[in-house]
């Protein structure tokens, strides 16, 4: 599948880049005919060749090197409301596995799991999109996924792709086929992998005499950001009867601006979804055209969002936007 996707992506991009100089030349040629001047073709022809070659080089790098250059990002989060017993608590956040990413290099997922386990986290939080089109993608990787280890286990939520909306249905309305497939994936995460999948629910983690609460919602899309996906989350339900220090897992970062900041006092939200468009050049990513929060940490008053750019791909390359493992350390600010 990935070879086909790469070929199609390369062909489309090369055709677009080759066409652009020709379109510009044609427009100038027509204007020149009208106004009585001549526009040489050679610079535009060479530009088309140069852009096409550059595109092929970048795609080759992104597919065979950039896609596997995992980065461990460390984020020190300080807040006076962090309970004393959780000072120094380490959370590993991972997101957007899109497990078909690894079909042409299964060993990379094994190495990835080994890297995460070597960190010895207190908790692992997975912020959605285990698969791209269906649960069948996950099955070859069951043994590796079962090896993910943390003192307080793995907590996960569902992302937009986990609702199978790109294969069986493109409707947000309840659908028997898609709901059955989503339930199969949910059972797989909970029973086969042993993860605590939070579907509009929460889990309290105790440490000594203190506790923190992890809140998890199904994917919630804010239609004024990004592209329209699916909204099945229920934040009021998920956070009902919770208090103290809370961390929200919500796949789509647009949810933070739309509901979390204006309607709650949840101090820390963890999201994924953007992939930073799988392209980052000198700190800039095309995802900034669609999202106000694209990657890394953002703060609004006393509330913080961290956007992890994921480990997998929806198209088979990454250029500059390296696959990310985030180590978040909770610090009690004094």
Image (cartoon, helix red, strand yellow):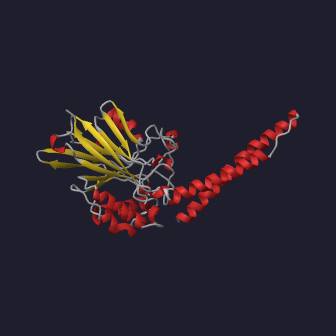
Residue found 16% across the figure and 49% down from its top: 206
Q: Residue furthest left?
A: 209
In front: 245, or 262? 245
Q: Residue furthest top?
A: 301
Q: Classify the position of the C terminus by image quarter.
A: top left
Decide if residue 131 is on the left or right side of residue 150: right
Q: Quadrant of residue 78?
A: top left
In front: 76, or 93? 76
Residue 223 screen position, x and y as percent:
47, 41
Q: Quadrant of residue 182?
A: bottom left
In front: 244, or 299? 299
Residue 150 screen position, x and y as percent:
24, 57
Residue found 68% across the figure and 54% down from its top: 15
Residue 18 screen position, x and y as percent:
70, 51
Total label count?
Answer: 0
Q: Is residue 316 above or below residue 41?
A: below
Q: Is residue 316 visible?
A: no
Q: Quadrant of residue 248?
A: top left
Q: Is residue 106 above or below residue 83?
A: below
In front: 164, or 127? 127
Residue 278 screen position, x and y as percent:
49, 50
Decide if residue 4 is on the left or right side of residue 34: left
Residue found 41% across the figure and 45% down from its top: 252
Q: Is residue 90 visible?
A: yes
Q: Residue furthest right?
A: 36
Decide if residue 298 is on the left or right side of residue 1: left
């Amino acid at each position: 599948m990935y070879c086909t996707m790469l070929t199609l992506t390369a062909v489309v991009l090369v055709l677009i880049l080759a066409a652009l100089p020709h379109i510009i030349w044609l427009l100038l040629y027509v204007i020149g005919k009208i106004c009585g001047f001549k526009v040489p073709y050679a610079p535009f022809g060479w530009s088309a060749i140069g852009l096409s070659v550059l595109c092929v080089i970048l795609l080759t790098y992104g597919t065979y090197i950039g896609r596997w250059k995992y980065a461990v990002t460390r984020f020190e989060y300080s807040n006076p409301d962090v309970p004393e017993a959780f000072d120094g608590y380490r959370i590993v956040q991972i997101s957007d596995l899109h497990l078909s990413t690894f079909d042409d290099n299964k060993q990379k997922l094994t190495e990835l799991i080994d890297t995460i386990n070597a960190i010895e986290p207190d908790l692992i939080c997975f912020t959605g999109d285990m698969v791209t089109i269906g649960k069948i993608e996950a099955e070859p990787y069951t043994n590796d996924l079962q090896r993910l280890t943390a003192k307080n286990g793995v907590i996960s939520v569902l992302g937009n792709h986990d609702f199978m909306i790109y294969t069986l249905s493109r409707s947000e309305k309840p659908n028997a086929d898609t709901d059955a497939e989503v339930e199969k994936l949910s059972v797989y995460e909970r029973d086969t992998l042993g993860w605590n999948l939070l579907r509009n629910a929460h889990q309290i983690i105790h440490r000594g005499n203190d506790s923190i609460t992890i809140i998890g919602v199904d994917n919630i899309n804010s239609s004024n950001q990004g592209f329209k996906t699916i909204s099945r989350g229920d934040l009021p339900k998920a956070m009902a009867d919770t208090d103290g220090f809370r961390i929200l897992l919500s796949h789509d970062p647009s949810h933070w601006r739309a509901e979390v900041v204006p309607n709650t006092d949840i101090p820390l939200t963890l999201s994924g979804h953007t992939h930073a468009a799988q392209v980052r050049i000198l700190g800039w990513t095309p995802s900034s055209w669609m999202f106000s929060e694209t990657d890394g940490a953002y703060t609004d008053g006393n509330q913080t969002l961290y956007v992890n750019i994921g480990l997998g791909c929806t198209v088979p390359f990454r250029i500059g936007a390296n696959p990310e493992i985030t180590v978040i350390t909770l610090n009690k600010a004094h």
